Image (spheres, helix red, strand yellow):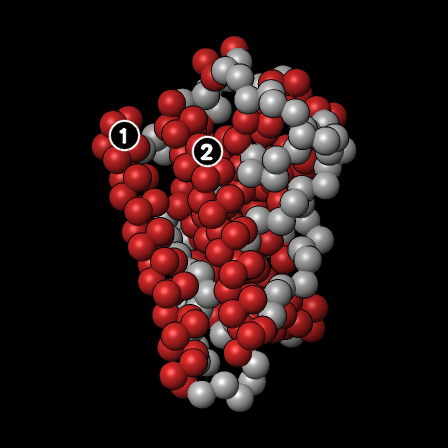
Amino acid sequence: MGGIAPYSSTRPRGHETHFHVRHKACGLECAPMKDVRRPGTWHRKVHPVFLEMAAANREFEEWLRGWLGRWADAQKALGPKAPAARYEALLTPLLDERDATLARFEARLDRVVERHGDPPPQSGAFAYLTPASGERSLDPEPGPLFRLLHWLRHGKTVESTAAEDSQGNLDAYAALTRTGEDVRRVVFAQGPLAPFKRDEDHRRLFELLSCYESEPLTEYELAECFDEFCPCGQVHGADALRKQYARLKHDLKAAQQNRQTE
C-alpha cells in the first residue's frame, strides 16, 4: 500500500491548510483541564469568521488525533508482509472515513465564507504557502504540503531557502533535503515526523487569529481564546501565549521582508 497518504489537503487555501497537519498536546504552562469554555469580551475583537473557523479547527483536530491513532494501530497490525486483501480490509474503511471527513469540513468552511465573506489576511499569515507575486518560479514547483512543512521545520519560505541554495549554501541544501524527507514520511506513512523546534502546537491557531484580529487581544484574552478553541484540552498560561504570539509575528514579518528583498 505504498503511496497512500494517511491524511492530506485537497484544496490548499491558507485558512484550510492548517487543518491537515498533526496537532500534538501543547505542553505550554498547562494545568489540569477545567471547564473555562465561556464567551468572553474578546469575541468582539475578532471577525466572526475566526470564531467559526477556530471551532471547526478544534473539532477537526480532535477527530484527527483519534483517526491517526487508529491508522497507526492498523499499520502495526498489518506488519510489513501482510497480503493485499488484508491491507484492503483494514485500511480502506479508514481512508473512506478520511475522505468523507475532509469533504465535510471543506463544505463547512465554504458555508462560513458564504455567510461572512473571506476577509483578506492582514498579517502575512499563511503567505508562505504560495509564491509571492513577481517571485521567480521554482522548478519543480513545490506543493502546499512541502511549503507548509518547510515553514514549520525551518521558519523560512521555500523561495528564501532556494535562493540561498542557488548560491551554494550547504545549510540551505540540507534544509530543502530535510523537508523532502518530511514530505515522504507523510505521503508514504513512514512513521511520525521528528518534532519541530518551533511551537507548531499553537502556531496554526495563532496564524488564524492574526488574520482576523480586528483589535489586539490582551494576554489574558489570548488565554481565554486558546482555552476555548485549542484542541489540546488544557488551560493555557497567558504569559507563555503572549511570548509565542510575539515570536510568530516576528517570523511572519521577517518572511515578508525576505520576500520583498529577493
Badge 1 local density, few (<14 within 10 Å), some, or many (20+)?
few
Amino acid marked by disc 1 = Gly
Residue placed under numbered mark 1 in the picture? 117
What residue lies at 45% left-to-right and 39% top-to-bottom? 59
Q: Closer to the observer: label 2 or label 1?
A: 2
- The answer to whether 41 appears left or right of 139 in the picture is right
Badge 2 local density, few (<14 within 10 Å), some, or many (20+)?
many
Whether residue 235 appears in this view of the structure is yes
SS for callout 1:
loop
State the residue lying farthest toward the top.
41
> Of marks 2 and 1, which one's residue comes earlier in the chain?
2
* In this view, 197 is above or below 137: above
Q: Quadrant of residue 120?
A: top left
Question: Where in the figure is residue 39, as x and y percent of width and height?
Answer: 50, 15
Question: Where in the figure is residue 249, as x and y percent of width and height?
Answer: 60, 35
Question: Where in the figure is residue 202, as x and y percent of width and height?
Answer: 61, 40
- The answer to whether 40 appears left or right of 251 in the picture is left
Amino acid marked by disc 2 = Ala
* In this view, 227 is above or below 170: above
Question: Where in the figure is residue 97, as x and y percent of width and height?
Answer: 36, 58
Circle number at residue 28: none
User: What is the quadrant of the N terminus in the image?
Assistant: bottom left
Circle number at residue 54: 2
Return the residue nearer the eye: 213 or 2.
2
SS for callout 2:
helix
Whether residue 159 appears in this view of the structure is no
Return the residue nearer the eye: 166 or 116.
116
What residue lies at 58% left-to-right and 73% top-to-bottom? 76
Return the residue nearer the eye: 60 or 46.
60
What residue lies at 41% left-to-right and 37% top-to-bottom? 56
State the residue lying farthest toward the left.
114
